[in-house]
Image: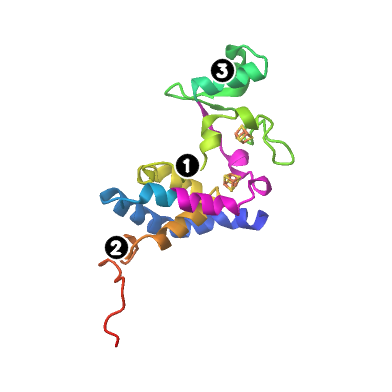
Amino acid sequence: MENILKQLPKKAKDKENENKKLFKKLRKKPPRHLDTLMVELHDKEFAKTDCLSCANCCKTTAPWLNDQDVARIAKHLKLKEQKFIEEYLEVGEDNEFSFKMIPCVFLGFDNECSIYDIRPKACKEYPHTNRRRFHKIEAITLENTAICPATYNIMEALKNALPIQYSEKGGKPRERFRRGGG
Ligand code: SF4
Ligand code: SF4
């Protein structure tokens, strides 16, 4: 896993233009089955992904927390919300909360999350590759291809799964049947 994570930023950079073009095409005309396709690709990838041998998202990024996350985690830690905010959180320009510490203070040496059952919604949903209207989250997905090996693989699988008009080359949809015969 160490090697995969080391090589990932360069691999993601190499694919950046290709992935940007794909998002542009998806935004222009999203395929009707995009939501179901993304769930399929996400589930297939995560069935073979061992997040406990990776934890790169928890080690390198700080998730956002909504008000419910703040209330839930503060209660779990038996802290007043204000105290929890002061000790653990950073408040952004738009008053959004994120954890102060990177790697995450709740990440154990064994890569287990010590607040797993009550972790922030953003952690639960990361890397968002199975969300509806996936074509709307280009920036975060491109960022995640350099952080999360599963996201990188899902993007590659997505390009393979889509008809040819969404590929780099563009052009007409692939013919479904062989010509001639007999
Ligand atoms: S709360 Fe848990 S899942 Fe979220 S970043 Fe921290 S360790 Fe990772
Ligand atoms: S970076 Fe991706 S593969 Fe790694 S732990 Fe996070 S979600 Fe799992």
Q: Secondary structure at mark 3?
A: helix
**116 to the left or right of 175:** right
Marks 3 and 1, how far apart at CA: 23 Å
Q: Residue at x 43, y 49 (%)?
A: 38
Q: Position of residue 177 (x, y in %)?
A: 31, 74
Question: Which residue is labeled 3 in the image?
Answer: 71
56 drawn magenta: yes
Question: Which residue is labeled 2 in the image?
Answer: 165
CB contact under 8 Å: marks 2 and 3: no
Q: Is mark 2 within 8 Å of ligand 2?
A: no
Q: Is mark 3 within 8 Å of ligand 1?
A: no
Magenta span: predominant SS is helix
Q: Position of residue 179 (x, y in %)?
A: 27, 80
Seen from the viewer's position, the closer of residues 37 and 63 is: 37
Question: Which residue is labeled 1 in the image?
Answer: 128
Q: Amino acid at mark 1?
A: His
Res 61 quadrant in image? top right
Q: Earlier in the sequence, mark 2 or mark 1?
A: 1
Marks 2 and 1, how far apart at CA: 24 Å
Instruction: Please state the quadrant of the image where ligand 1 appears.
Output: top right
Q: Earlier in the sequence, mark 2 or mark 3?
A: 3
Q: Residue at x 57, y 23 (%)?
A: 89
Seen from the viewer's position, the closer of residues 93 and 5 is: 5
The crowding category of the residue bearing disc 3, from other C-alpha atoms within 10 Å (few below 14, some 14 to 19, many at least 20), is: some
Q: Give the extent of the magenta segment.
A: 39-65
